[in-house]
Image (cartoon, helix red, strand yellow):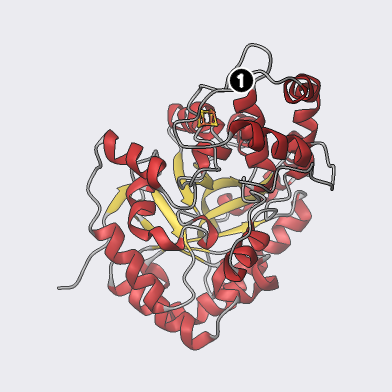
């Protein structure tokens, strides 16, 4: 018998999900033959969580996955998402999803990409999408509901107001650097409420492609039930199956070593260790906001063309720049004063040049297209 992907309970739903989920976004980028081969390999390895969204290729992902699954629909927990905020639009989309996937029900329907409190208000107001979700549940078209986000704090009101069974957000080792609130606030509240946690992007949308083993070692050690991941080929999927099947609960020292040594973090990305929480300016918070702005991916250094292209593709992927800049405004005067002074800044245990990074972060977060002279030297 070949490798079998382990399973975990999904919150209090009663569902048992394979820890490696098959994410549908990448199915847009490849042909039906590849989708068929990926689904066949995934199911053969014991995978049972397949997730897509109505907006992925305007339904193309759902069509391809539905064809690839064929008569194996009941072998999997099938999830899709709608970004519609009103009842009429959500009802239309859930019906389109069912038709495209060739099924009469979804196991999980997900409110897609909540970003603002206004999203939750729109969903929960009379005529909002909550009504369509409830109607779909009452009619047996949907079993459980969840909400996904790329701005984690948006999940706090969602968890209180939308009667969710699960939440979905990033789980990878960039997260504690850029979105530490996920660990401090969002995940603990989700677990208090008994919700399942669907992780996404364990490889950071491909940014952690050099580090598949450490990436899964780290991600599966977090508060998570399933990691939805995209695969553009059976070979990519096979490498991830190997990683999750070899997983053992790591020691705390192993997780520290990953954060210390990860090549993607290097001597630029702030690990939020606490040393830069200064009396005059919360520099660590500035670096966190830089993480929300561009995932701390632009470091002002020359790099290879493929690495540059990957960073350009990913750094603004979630459109959080304006939110980060707005949060930075009250901090900016203290940072300006700090940069104008010649006071000593903390020595970083990860080798980060704190003054240079602060200068870059300030420049990004104030929207100044011109970087001051000196920040390109290293
Ligand atoms: S010392 Fe380094 S890791 Fe710690 S807060 Fe400062 S920049 Fe971040």
Q: Is residue 124 visible?
A: no
Task: Please identify the residue farthest to the left as the structure is shown.
Answer: 1
Displayed quadrant of residue 362: top right
Which one is nearer the viewer's eye here, 138 or 25?
A: 25
Q: Is residue 109 above or below residue 59?
A: above
Which one is nearer the viewer's eye here, 193 or 169?
A: 169
Displayed quadrant of residue 62: bottom right
Which residue occupies 41% across, 41% down? 259
Q: Is residue 214 above or below residue 125?
A: below
Q: Which residue is mark 1?
A: 344
Q: Position of residue 105 (x, y in %)?
A: 52, 63
Q: Left or right: where does residue 280 sit relative to residue 373?
A: left
Q: Left or right: where does residue 280 sit relative to residue 49?
A: right
How many numbered badges does the structure rendering display?
1
Q: Is residue 62 above or below residue 171?
A: below
Displayed quadrant of residue 278: top right
Q: Position of residue 58 (x, y in %)?
A: 70, 71
Q: Position of residue 60 (x, y in %)?
A: 63, 76
Q: Position of residue 180 (x, y in %)?
A: 53, 33
If the image is split into quadrants, where does the N terminus sit? Answer: bottom left
Secondary structure beneath dot 1 equals loop
Which one is nearer the viewer's eye here, 60 or 165?
A: 60
Judge the density around disc 1: few (<14), some (14-19), many (≥20) Cα neighbours within 10 Å: few
Q: Is residue 251 visible?
A: yes
Task: Please identify the residue farthest to the top as the structure is shown.
Answer: 279
Which residue occupies 61% across, 38% down? 152
Label 1 CB, ligand 1: below 8 Å?
Answer: no
Which residue occupies 32% across, 49% down? 217
């Amino acid at each position: 018998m070949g490798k079998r992907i382990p399973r975990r309970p999904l919150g209090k739903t009663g569902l048992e999900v394979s820890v490696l989920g098959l994410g549908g976004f990448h199915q847009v980028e490849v042909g039906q033959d590849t989708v068929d081969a990926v689904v066949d390999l995934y199911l053969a390895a014991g995978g049972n969580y397949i997730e897509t969204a109505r907006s992925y290729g305007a339904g193309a992902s759902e069509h391809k996955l539905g064809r690839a699954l064929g008569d194996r629909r009941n072998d999997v927990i099938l999830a899709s998402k709608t970004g519609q905020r009103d009842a009429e639009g959500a009802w239309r989309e859930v019906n389109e999803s069912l038709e495209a996937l060739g099924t009469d029900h979804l196991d999980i329907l997900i409110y897609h990409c909540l970003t603002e409190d206004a999203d939750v208000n729109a969903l929960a107001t009379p005529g909002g999408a909550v009504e369509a979700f409830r109607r779909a549940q009452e009619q047996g078209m949907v079993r459980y509901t969840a909400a996904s986000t790329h701005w984690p704090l948006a999940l706090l009101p969602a968890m209180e107001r939308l009667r969710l069974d699960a939440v979905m957000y990033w789980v990878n080792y960039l997260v504690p650097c850029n979105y530490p609130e996920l660990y401090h606030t969002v995940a603990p509240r989700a677990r208090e409420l008994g919700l399942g946690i669907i992780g996404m992007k364990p490889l950071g949308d491909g940014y952690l492609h050099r580090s598949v083993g450490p990436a899964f070692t780290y991600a599966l050690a977090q508060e998570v039930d399933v990691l939805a991941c995209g695969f553009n080929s059976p070979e990519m999927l096979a490498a991830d199956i190997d990683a999750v099947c070899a997983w053992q609960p790591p020691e705390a020292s192993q997780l520290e070593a990953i954060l210390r040594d990860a090549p993607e973090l290097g001597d630029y990305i702030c690990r939020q260790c606490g040393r830069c929480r200064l009396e005059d300016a919360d520099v660590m918070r500035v670096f966190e906001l830089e993480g929300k702005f561009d995932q701390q991916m632009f470091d002002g250094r020359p790099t290879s063309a493929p690495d540059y292209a990957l960073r350009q593709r990913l750094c603004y992927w979630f459109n959080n720049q304006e939110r980060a800049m707005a949060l930075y405004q009250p901090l900016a005067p203290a940072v300006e004063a700090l940069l104008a002074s010649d006071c000593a800044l903390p020595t970083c245990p990860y080798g980060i040049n704190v003054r240079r990074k602060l200068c870059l972060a300030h420049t990004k977060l104030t929207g100044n297209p011109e970087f001051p002279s000196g920040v390109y030297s290293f």
